[in-house]
Image (cartoon, rainbow, N blue to C red):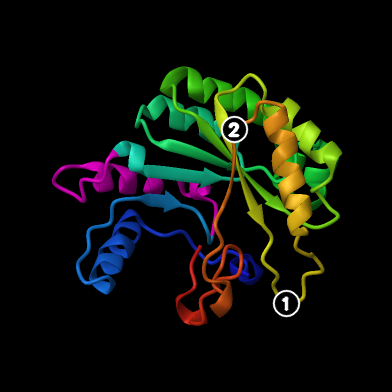
Amino acid sequence: MSGKDGFKRNLTAGEIVMQLLEAENLTSARRISNVVFMGIGEPLDNYDNLIKAIKIIMDKKGLAVGKRKITVSTVGIPDKIKKLADEHLGINLSISLHSADDNKRSSFMPINRKYNLRELIFSLKEYQSKEDIPVTFEYLLIGGLNDSKIDAETLSMYVKGIDSKVNLIVYNPIPAIDFHRSAASKVDFFKETLEKNKVFVTIRKERGSDIDAACGQLKSGNNKKDVS
C-alpha cells in the first residue's frame, strides 16, 4: 500500500534518526534496540543519508544501537550492495527476493529487469566476503504465483553456496491488487521442501493484520507528509 502513492522525496539523515527518537517517546521512553531500514522506499536509493543515519544510530554518543542489531532491507541493487560492503559497518543485509526465477521475478519486481538474479547473487557473495555475515532472503508467498514445489526447488538452488537464511512471509491482502494468500498447507510444504534441501528457513509471525497494519498493508493517512 505504501508504494501506491509513488515517490515524493528522500528522508534526510536527521529525519531518519528522529523517527527512532519519536518511537522511543511513544513507547514510554523504552530504548530502541533493533532497527530495520525498509518499508516506504528503497534504502539504498537514499544511500548517503542512509549511511549517515546508521553511523549516528550506532555511535555511542548517538543512540548506541549495536551493529548486529541493524538491518538494511533492499530489493537488490548490486552496485550499492558492493558499496555498502566497503563501508565495513558490520550490519545485517536482507534481500526482498520473492522469486528465484528471472522471468517470474521481473514480472512483479521491475528492479529485476535492470539487475538480474545472477548480478544480485554475485554482489551478495562479495558483500559476504568482506563482512562475513549471513544474508537473509525475504520471500513473500503469493497463492498460485510463487509457492509451487518448482519455486521452492529453484529457490533452494539459488541460495546454495551462500551463508543465508530464508524468511517466508505470507501475503497480506490489500485492496485493488488481485493477489491471494498461499494456503497454510502450501506454506508448510514450501518450508519442508527448503528444509529437505538443507536451507535454513523461518516463517515470519504475522502481526497487525487485524488493523490492516501487517507487512505490506500499512500506509500513511497523512498525504501532506508522505515521504519515501
The answer to whether residue 116 shows anywhere in this view is: no
Residue closer to the observer: 24 or 147: 147
Left or right: 121 in relation to 206: right
The answer to whether residue 112 shows anywhere in this view is: yes
Circle 1 Cα neighbour tier, 10 Å, few/some/many (<14 / 14–19 / ≥20): few
Looking at numbered disc 2 in the image, what kind of residue is underneath it? Phe
Q: Quarter-wise, where is residue 156 in the image?
A: top right
Circle 2 Cα neighbour tier, 10 Å, few/some/many (<14 / 14–19 / ≥20): some
List the residue tagged with mark 2.
Answer: 200
Residue closer to the observer: 110 or 21: 21
List the residue tagged with mark 1.
Answer: 175
Question: Looking at the image, which residue is at 45% across and 32% down?
Answer: 84
Q: Position of residue 126 (x, y in %)?
A: 54, 20
Looking at numbered disc 1 in the image, what kind of residue is underneath it? Pro
Question: Looking at the image, which residue is at 59% across and 22% down?
Answer: 162
Q: Is residue 180 magenta?
A: no
Question: Looking at the image, which residue is at 32% across and 49% down?
Answer: 53
Left or right: 142 in relation to 57: right
Q: Nearer the viewer, mark 2 or mark 1?
A: 2
The part of the chain drawn in magenta is: 41-66
81, above or below 228, in the image: above
Earlier in the chain: of badge 2 and badge 1, it is 1
Q: Quarter-wise, where is residue 13 in the image?
A: bottom left
Question: Looking at the image, which residue is at 67% across and 42% down?
Answer: 97
Q: Are marks 2 and 1 in contact (CB under 8 Å)?
A: no
Residue closer to the observer: 68 or 41: 68
Magenta span main SS: helix
Label 2 – label 1 distance at C-alpha: 33 Å
Q: Is residue 42 magenta?
A: yes
Instruction: Label 2, secondary structure: give it.
Output: loop
Q: Position of residue 65 (x, y in %)?
A: 26, 46
Q: Quarter-wise, where is residue 198 in the image?
A: top right
